Image (cartoon, rainbow, N blue to C red):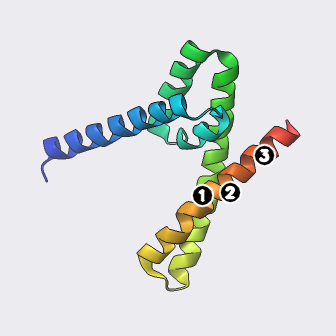
Amino acid sequence: MGIIADLMLRFLLGGAAVAGCYLLLLVVPWKSFAGIFAAFPAVLASAVIMTGHYDGNKAASQLALGATAGMLGCTVCVAVTLWGLLAGWGWLGSLIISIPAWLISSMFFIRVIKEYR
């Protein structure tokens, strides 16, 4: 794949991720849960700015809280993936267990952060 095709693919995937997360923010009533998906670095800045602009500082704060929880969940996801690979489950088995681990741990971190702030 040439450099132009590679850059175009990255642009399309990044734009799709940003648009998808924004659409999720519109649909999901819990901004902190939607923020889990805004943890992607390409998405976070634009999601917080757009949420703050349209829904106010409190909604942007909830989104940032969810993004923080999502980033902490990414750490769990990496650890579970490594464990799955070392256990010999291969990349597919590791992926199957790591994605739910990310989601569940991210939701757990939302509760912990809200309880102790």
Residue 17: quarter of image: top left
Instruction: Examine the rendered structure and indicate whether residue 93 appears above or below residue 28.
Output: below
Q: Position of residue 112 (x, y in %)?
A: 81, 47
Q: Position of residue 39 (x, y in %)?
A: 55, 41
Residue 105 — which label? Answer: 2
| Label 1 element class | helix
Residue type, mark 3 in image? Arg
Q: Residues within 10 Å of mark 1 (few under 14, many from 20)?
A: many
Tell me how far mark 1 sits from mark 3, CA to CA: 14 Å
Q: Residue at left 12%, top 49%?
A: 2
In the image, 67 versus 29, the foreground residue is 29
Q: Residue furthest left?
A: 2
For disc 1, the marked residue is 102
Q: Residue at left 56%, top 21%?
A: 51
| Label 3 element class | helix
CB of mark 2 within 8 Å of CB of mark 1?
Answer: yes
Give the tally of numbered discs.
Answer: 3
Q: Earlier in the sequence, mark 3 or mark 2?
A: 2
| Label 2 element class | helix
Residue type, mark 1 in image? Trp
Q: Residues within 10 Å of mark 2 (few under 14, many from 20)?
A: many
Q: Is residue 82 left or right of residue 68?
A: left
Quarter the C terminus occupies: top right
Q: Earlier in the sequence, mark 1 or mark 3?
A: 1
Tell me how far mark 3 sits from mark 2, CA to CA: 10 Å
Q: Is residue 85 left or right of residue 104?
A: left
Q: Residues within 10 Å of mark 3 (few under 14, many from 20)?
A: some
Q: Is residue 13 left or right of residue 46?
A: left
Quarter the N terminus occupies: bottom left
Q: Residue at left 69%, top 35%?
A: 65
Residue type, mark 2 in image? Ser
Residue 111 — which label? Answer: 3
